[in-house]
Amino acid sequence: MKFTIAVNYRSVQLLRILVSGIFLVAGFNHLIHLEKTVNRINQANFKGIALFFGNPELLVIASGIVMLIAGISLLIGFKTRYAAIVLALVLIPITLTIQVGQITTLGPLFKNIAIMGGLLFFILNDISLIKQNK
């Protein structure tokens, strides 16, 4: 069974722009505050997840660059689905490493869960079709 849902194109644009913002800020912060971000990993309860993938400093630099590139792509609407997939793949290990082990502050964990919801919208929906049906 297939359902059709009317979606306002402006709401999709706003969602895309607003969701991309957190990745642009985080990407810049990873690169500008490299040592601080590496220290957050080293102090995390589940730092083993990050260490499994390699050197924390290289991971922070790589994730910063990826978040900037994919964040800009999401912002401008270029290859939106692919940008959302890449951002989700970056968000998952960050969330598991940093937020999951901090049971006293659940706000950041649920912020990342909400961001994942926004990314899933772009992963699961063909935005090119929404553009055609303005």
Image (cartoon, grey):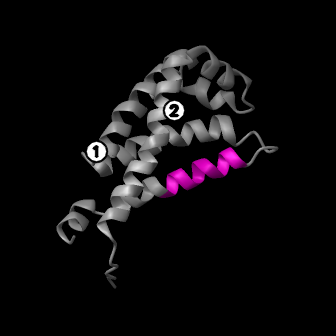
Q: In this view, does 105 lie to the left or right of 123?
A: right
Q: Can you give x and y, in whole percent of width and height, for residue 130 in the image?
A: 25, 67
Label 2 SS:
helix
Residue at figure coordinates x 64%, y 35% from the top left? 97
Q: Which numbered marker is on residue 76? A: 1
Residue 28 belongs to magenta span: no
Residue under the point 44% across and 23% down: 62
On the question of residue 8 being in view, the answer is yes
Residue 16: give x, y in percent of width and height: 38, 52
**Vertical relation: 109 (above or below) 41:** below
Please, is residue 29 above or below residue 79 in the view?
above
Circle 1 sits in a helix, a strand or a loop, which is it?
helix
Q: Quarter-wise, where is residue 74 in the image?
A: top left
The correct choice, above or below, for 10 with respect to 82 in the image is below
Prevailing secondary structure of the magenta residues:
helix
- For residue 26, which numbered disc appears in the image? 2
Residue found at x 74% / y 48%: 106
Mark 2 neighbour class, 10 Å CA radius: few under 14, some 14 to 19, many 20 or more? some
Tell me which amino acid carries mark 2. Answer: Ala
Q: Which of marks 2 and 1 is nearer the N terminus?
A: 2
Q: Residue at x 68, y 25 (%)?
A: 40
Identity of the residue furthest to the left in this view:
132
Q: Looking at numbered disc 1 in the image, what kind of residue is underneath it?
A: Ile
> Which residues lie in the magenta part?
107-117
CA distance for labels 2 and 1 = 17 Å
Where, quadrant-wise, is the N terminus in this rendering? bottom left
Q: Quadrant of the C terminus?
A: bottom left
Where residue 121 sits in the image (x, y, percent)? 41, 60
Asked if residue 55 shows in the view, the reply is no
- In this picture, residue 91 sits left or right of residue 100: left
The image's mark for residue 58 is: none
